[in-house]
Image: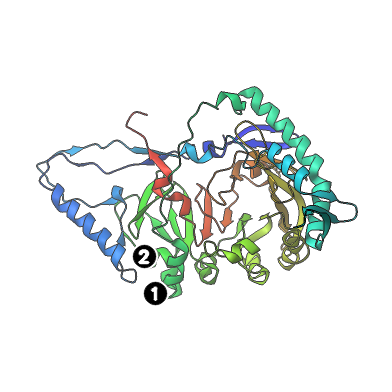
């Protein structure tokens, strides 16, 4: 269970537990105990991987190690290979101390600035060259004033609700006081090199030969041996309907596909294969790449303009009464855009506003709650697609609770950029049991969900996981 505690204010989540309960077990086919065929199959794999890395446009196979076809030998008996189990690297959730401590924040605030929130004026005391002191007034812009007003409205909600969930986590031992982990050595964490730029590959894939609509049907990874070409991967929804994990290789990089998942690796301009599936979804979670100044200055992350976000075909993907959940930053400009423009354009009625509160393993906010720069929380705007048919929302036998407002999701964040906590268990009481779920702009896969994005396999890279020894 990813839900550690559920109280009136919301939920305390264990993101790492959610990932590992997926049970990443990679089953391999039995292989002949006789060694005389090993060299043939080994060369076959090496050549295929080399071709994949060197020729993007060709139909280079993406081979799962558990699906290599090996020559049969009637005289040799097959040796059973135990399944290889993988778990997500726990050190990627090792957030033991705040990114900015409250003491440092308070000292800087006292020494460098005095704020007058009523007048919207920040007075900084600075020394002139000749030693005289002068007051320099900096007027807040409208965005800063709106942010301060919004923070004032939700501050008590965040503080009181988080405190109750944190206290429960400390009581149960899920969270632990800082002095208990002070002796733990914080070794530097080595992250996988971005040798396979997924978003860049999606851009290159636009130049692949186009396929007709009949060829763009969903590609199902079967239980038996098979290969997947790069053109398949970039132009079709891929489904792993099996009950075990599969591994694919893309441009020499290995990715784990959990059971019962499906995905489309593409950018917004190549989303048509998702529409060709003719599926509609009961839940759509969206994490848009919001435009901001830091993203503009950096070439590391792509972003979409508000106009591009509005063009996402939510009405075509949403089932009647679909629950739409959109992650939003603390910029009031983005929040207003969702409420006043985006949701109305999709015929989505707003029903709730939740917040994700990020804490350390000892229960402290990762940023001071009143920091003027970064807040320890982010928002989620929940709404439902307006009635499109006369069909009821659910059967009389199915109980779906009304969605409450002002709930908190409290968790220790992953240190990886934009690895949001899972919402599957949090939302399960508010959707029908057999509801179909879609995550847009996803960076990881979930069993039972369809995921789409130009980095949809990013956090499925095998280097983010640890292979356990047999018997663990």
Residue assigned mark 1 = 208
**Label 1–label 2 contact, CB within 8 A:** yes
In the image: residue 119, left or right of residue 444? right
In the rendered image, the vertical position of residue 12 relative to residue 176, given as above or below: below
In the image: residue 446, left or right of residue 3? left
Residue assigned mark 2 = 230
In the rendered image, the vertical position of residue 224 relative to residue 297, given as above or below: above
- Quadrant of image for the N terminus: top right
Label 1 crowd bin: few (<14), some (14–19), many (20+), radius 10 Å: some
Residue 354, percent across and down? 73, 47
**Rendered image quadrant of residue 362:** top right
- Quadrant of image for the C terminus: top left
Residue lying at the far front of the rendered structure: 130
Residue 24, percent across and down? 42, 41
Residue 440, percent across and down? 57, 58
Label 2: which secondary element: helix
Q: How far apart are marks 1 and 2 (CA)?
A: 10 Å
Query: Residue placed at 23% from the left, 52% from the top?
Result: 69
* Residue 57 visible in the picture: yes
Q: How many marks?
A: 2
């Amino acid at each position: 269970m990813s839900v550690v505690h559920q109280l009136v204010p919301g939920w305390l989540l264990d993101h790492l537990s959610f990932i590992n309960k997926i049970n990443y077990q990679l089953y391999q086919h039995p292989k002949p105990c006789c060694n005389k065929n090993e060299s043939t199959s080994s060369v076959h794999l090496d050549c295929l991987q080399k071709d994949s890395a060197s020729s993007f446009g060709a139909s280079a196979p993406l081979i799962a190690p558990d699906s290599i076809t090996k020559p049969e030998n009637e005289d040799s008996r097959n040796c059973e290979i135990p399944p290889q189990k993988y778990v997500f690297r726990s050190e990627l959730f090792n957030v033991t101390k705040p990114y900015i401590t409250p003491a440092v924040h308070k000292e800087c605030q006292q020494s460098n600035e005095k704020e007058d929130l009523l007048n919207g004026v920040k007075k900084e005391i600075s020394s002139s060259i000749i030693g005289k002191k002068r007051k320099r007034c900096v007027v807040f812009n409208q965005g800063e004033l709106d942010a301060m007003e919004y923070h004032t409205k939700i501050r008590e909600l965040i503080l009181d609700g988080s405190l109750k969930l944190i206290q429960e986590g400390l009581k149960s031992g899920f969270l632990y006081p800082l002095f208990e982990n002070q002796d733990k050595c914080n070794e530097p964490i080595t992250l996988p090199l971005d040798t396979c730029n997924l978003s860049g590959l999606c851009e290159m894939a636009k130049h692949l030969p186009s396929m007709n609509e009949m060829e763009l049907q969903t590609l199902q990874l079967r239980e038996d041996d098979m290969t997947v070409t790069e053109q398949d991967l970039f132009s079709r929804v891929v489904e792993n309907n099996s009950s075990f994990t599969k591994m694919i290789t893309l441009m020499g990089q290995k990715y784990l596909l959990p059971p019962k998942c499906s995905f489309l690796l593409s950018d917004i301009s190549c989303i048509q294969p998702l529409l060709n599936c003719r599926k509609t979804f009961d839940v759509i979670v969206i994490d848009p790449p919001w435009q901001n100044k830091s993203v503009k200055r950096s070439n590391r992350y792509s972003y979409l303009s508000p106009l591009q976000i509005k063009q996402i075909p939510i009405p075509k993907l949403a089932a009647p009464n679909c629950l739409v959940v959109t992650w939003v930053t603390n910029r009031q400009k983005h929040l207003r855009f969702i409420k006043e423009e985006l949701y109305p354009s999709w015929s989505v009625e707003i029903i709730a506003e939740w917040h994700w509160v990020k804490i350390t393993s000892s229960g402290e906010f990762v940023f001071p709650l009143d920091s003027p720069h970064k807040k320890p929380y982010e928002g989620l705007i929940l709404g439902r697609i307006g009635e499109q048919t006369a069909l009821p929302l659910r059967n009389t036998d199915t109980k779906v609770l009304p969605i409450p407002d002002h709930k908190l999701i409290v968790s220790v964040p992953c240190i990886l950029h934009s690895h949001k906590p899972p919402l599957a268990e949090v939302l399960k009481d508010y959707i029908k049991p057999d509801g179909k779920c879609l995550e847009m702009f996803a960076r990881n896969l979930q069993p039972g969900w369809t995921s789409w994005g130009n980095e949809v396999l990013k956090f499925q890279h095998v280097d983010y996981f640890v292979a356990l020894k047999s018997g663990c």
